[in-house]
Amino acid sequence: MDTIDKTYSCKAAAYEASEDVGRNGSTAPTIGDVINARLGRRDMLRGALAVGAVTAFMGPVLTAGTAKAQQTRYVFDEIEHGVDETHHVAPGYDAQVLLRWGDPILPGAPAFDPMNQTAAAQAQQFGYNNDYIGYVPLPAGSNSATHGLLCVNHEYTNEEVMLPGVAKQDDSYADMTEELVNIEMAAHGGSIVEVEMVDGAWTYKQDSAYNRRITAETPMRLSGPAAGHDLLKTAADPSGTEVLGTINNCAGGITPWGTYLMAEENFHGYFWGDMPENHANYEQFARYGVPGAWYAWGRFHDRFDVTKEPNEANRFGWVVEVDPLDPNSTPVKRTAMGRFKHEGAESIVNSDGRVVVYMGDDERFEYLYKFVTNGTFNADDPAANADLLDDGTLYVARFDETGVDWLPLVHGRNGLTEENGFSDQGDVLVRTRMAADLLGATPMDRPEDVEPSRATNNVYVMLTNNSRRQSDQVDFANPRAENLFGHILELVPPGGDHGAERYEWNILVQCGDPSVDEVGALWNPETTENGWFAAPDNCAVDSRGRLWISTDQGSGWARTGTADGIWGLETEGDLRGTGKMFFRVPLGAEMCGPVFTPDDTTLFVAVQH
């Protein structure tokens, strides 16, 4: 099974490398093959890059001489590309640090002492490596833009940065004690924090009754079709319905009824041990990369050692629902939404009242998913929506040159039968990747955030990169060996129906520096030298329907010569496909978590590592 080489300089590099592994052995056409077929069908000539390809694929984009007829919707002075040790924001805007790792957020929590950390203190303080941010207005049910709850994911920890006297660990984890491991576990999960604007500046309330820390040890409930399944039963939980904690929470979402969705991504890295080849979990563990052995947790907690507790890894890789308005509520892992390396879980209420949640599996050559509830959203009674995410249909995407089919991952259909190794619906959901393989889903270039727009009903898919594309895959639509820069897809549901099983699709932009011919980037000609970006990761659509992109280049900033940041990206009209740079993070940081207040006057962002 694949493991991470401990020669990487830090956990961030290890995560980047893991996402580059590509464990999918599917022979289904890649998205590059589909793009090539689509342009080939339209008789596009090899090498005719520029306007011909842009018009065929990105919709009606005009030349530089005519695009100026439309005024940009992003009214700010663009900042410049660059790398340095601080952050930069567009002129006329203020950037304020609101919360930092270690800030005490629970009533009575001790002040942060980085040289004398304890697990008990960390469990009351803001966690490490913040990623997704959700905003829930207060009071409940209001549209307040100056008072609310921030729901923040804490993705992972770097022992060599956060723990005094501890170097980056090799396979022996010689420096890691049980207390240091417990500090790491307490720094994972999420934080819910009450925030308010006071005298023109944001502050957080440490004495708020809403404030909460969720960690790798927080008791949770498993629900939905896989709850109680034999593959989820352990010695500590023979019922298969209760689990401790959530880990590697990357992006997420806020539901229409105001709950907080935490998406578990690279869960495989937390497990160590050896799985016998004759064990029932062996094949699917290999498909998911378990065990990754990135942490010493298995030394002190048997549940993270697959040799001792082989089913514990099956209890991670889900979407977790949390009620931020009730700090005493039990988080719930919603198994109906599938088990994979969830990047996010953004939702929209369909025209028929059903709720549709879009999700990406963040690894090279993995798949794009959506979940459609059977029940309908009740705006007048939030309690009626409590279990909507337990009952519905999970779909995986298969692209062709004219559209995308959403294939239901339902036991008994499309070959998902006992004869093909799937005993029931719970089995399909625990082994979602393998079920999607069987259906011939399209391997994608690392699908991360997937965001529906309530203004247009279109859906935007961030495809961060795919460095494993080989030179024999180079074609007109993918003219670069190794997709180092990523691209963004736009999905168009027919008549705005997100429950439909076939959509149209387009490429919105193909990322990278358009001034470098061999990069093969596709942008609107009005994009400036600072308006292009690489490695789209998270995104947000504001109340006016404007799309904002955050980037995660990893070590790729050395290729592009610019740090990560936030860009506005036009999606409509003559300027469609034009980027504009708004915010830039310090060198080496990852840009995460963009979310706006309801009136678009404040943008909350997460600056990670």
Image: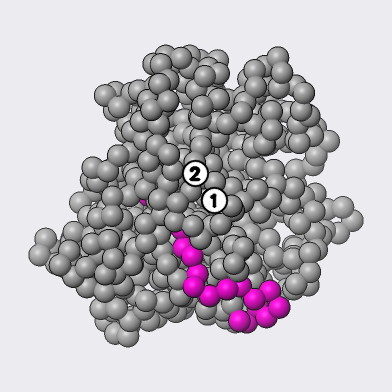
* Residue 517 in the image: above or below residue 340: above
Asked if residue 304 can be seen in this view, the reply is no
The boundaries of the magenta stretch are 367-384
Q: Amino acid at mark 1?
A: Pro
Crowding around mark 1 (Cα neighbors within 10 Å: few <14, some 14 to 19, many 20+) is some
Crowding around mark 2 (Cα neighbors within 10 Å: few <14, some 14 to 19, many 20+) is some
Residue at image location 62% in from the left, 82% down from the top: 383
**Tag 2's secondary structure?**
strand
Q: Amino acid at mark 2?
A: Glu
22 in the magenta segment: no
For this view, does 366 lie left or right of residue 201? Answer: left
Tell which circle, 1 or 2, labels the residue nearer the N-terminal end.
1
Residue nearer the viewer, 35 or 403: 403
Q: Can you give x and y, in whole percent of width and height, for residue 26 in the image?
A: 24, 46
Asked if residue 132 can be seen in this view, the reply is yes
Name the residue beneath numbered marker 1. 494
For this view, does 429 lie left or right of residue 285? Answer: right
Residue nearer the viewer, 402 or 29: 402
How are the colours assigned in the image? Answer: one colour
**Tag 1's secondary structure?**
helix
Residue at image location 41% in from the left, 77% down from the top: 224
Residue nearer the viewer, 189 or 180: 189
State the mark number for residue 504: 2
Residue at image location 41% in from the left, 54% down from the top: 406
Q: Can you give x and y, in whole percent of width and height, for residue 540 in the image?
A: 63, 48
Q: Can you give x and y, in whole percent of width and height, for residue 68 in the image?
A: 75, 21
State the mark number for residue 555: none
* Residue 291 in the image: above or below residue 570: below
Do the residues under discs 1 and 2 have CB atoms within 8 angstroms?
A: yes
